[in-house]
Each structure stands twice: as C-alpha cells, then as structure tokens.
Image (tube, rainbow, N blue to C red):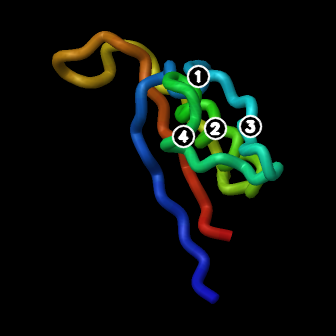
Amino acid sequence: EHEGRVGVIIPHGVLFRGKAPKKYDKNGNLLPLELQEAGQQEGQIRANLIEKNNIDAIIGLPANIFFGTGIPTLIMVLKKK
C-alpha cells in the first residue's frame, strides 16, 4: 500500500481545546463526532490521531510568523500508515 505524509499549518490552540472523553450510546457503541457534545469534537479528533499513531511530528512556530496574525502556530505532520 501507499504510504504518505501531509503537513498542516494550524493554530497552537488545537493541541489543547476540547475535551477528549469518548461518548457511547446505550448499546456501548462509540457515538460519531457529530453527536458528541459541543466543544469535544476537536479533542476527539486529536485522541483518534494519537490512538491510530497518525501523528509523525509537531513543529511549533513562533507568534507573528504569518503576516496579519500574531497567534502562535504549528505544523502537524500526519502519516497515512
């Protein structure tokens, strides 16, 4: 199979926002992200990336590196396998 990587530039806060508890229905099945409580989707996505070992690297960038914004950013490198 094909292996691949992608680098995504995202705000630093993505690493910390949202809780990551899993929510289950009455039959014990994991609820899809759209049925999770508001504010938890970001944490659940992050937890899934970690559980599936998709994160290859996180590279922190300083604030003011991009014109027009002063927020710190990062490059998240994800791998397919």
Of pointers 2 and 3, the one earlier in the residue sequence: 3
Where 6 sits versus 42, above or below? below
State if disc 3 and disc 1 touch (CB < 8 Å).
Answer: no
Q: Which residue is drawn at 49% across and 43% down?
A: 34
Question: CA separation, marks 2 and 4?
Answer: 12 Å
Label 3 sits on residue = 22
Nearest to viewer (mark 1 / mark 3): 3
Question: Under tag 4, what secondary structure?
Answer: helix
Q: How many numbered marks appear?
A: 4
State if disc 1 and disc 2 touch (CB < 8 Å).
Answer: yes
Question: CA separation, marks 4 and 1?
Answer: 14 Å
Label 1 sits on residue = 18
Nearest to viewer (mark 4 / mark 1): 4
What x and y, as percent, mark residue 69? 24, 15
Quick one: 48 or 61, which is closer to the camera? 48
Question: Under tag 1, what secondary structure?
Answer: loop
Question: CA separation, marks 2 and 3?
Answer: 7 Å
The amino acid type of the residue labelled 1 equals Gly
Of pointers 4 and 1, the one earlier in the residue sequence: 1
State if disc 3 and disc 4 touch (CB < 8 Å).
Answer: no
Label 4 sits on residue = 35
Q: How crowded is mark 1: few (under 14 residues within 10 Å), some or many (20 or more)?
A: some
The amino acid type of the residue labelled 2 equals Gln
Question: CA separation, marks 4 and 3?
Answer: 11 Å
Question: CA separation, marks 1 and 3?
Answer: 12 Å
State if disc 3 and disc 2 touch (CB < 8 Å).
Answer: yes
The amino acid type of the residue labelled 3 equals Lys
**Disc assigned to residue 44:** 2
Q: Is residue 78 left or right of residue 70?
A: right
Q: Residues within 10 Å of mark 4 (few under 14, many from 20)?
A: few
Nearest to viewer (mark 2 / mark 4): 4
Which residue is farthest right? 28
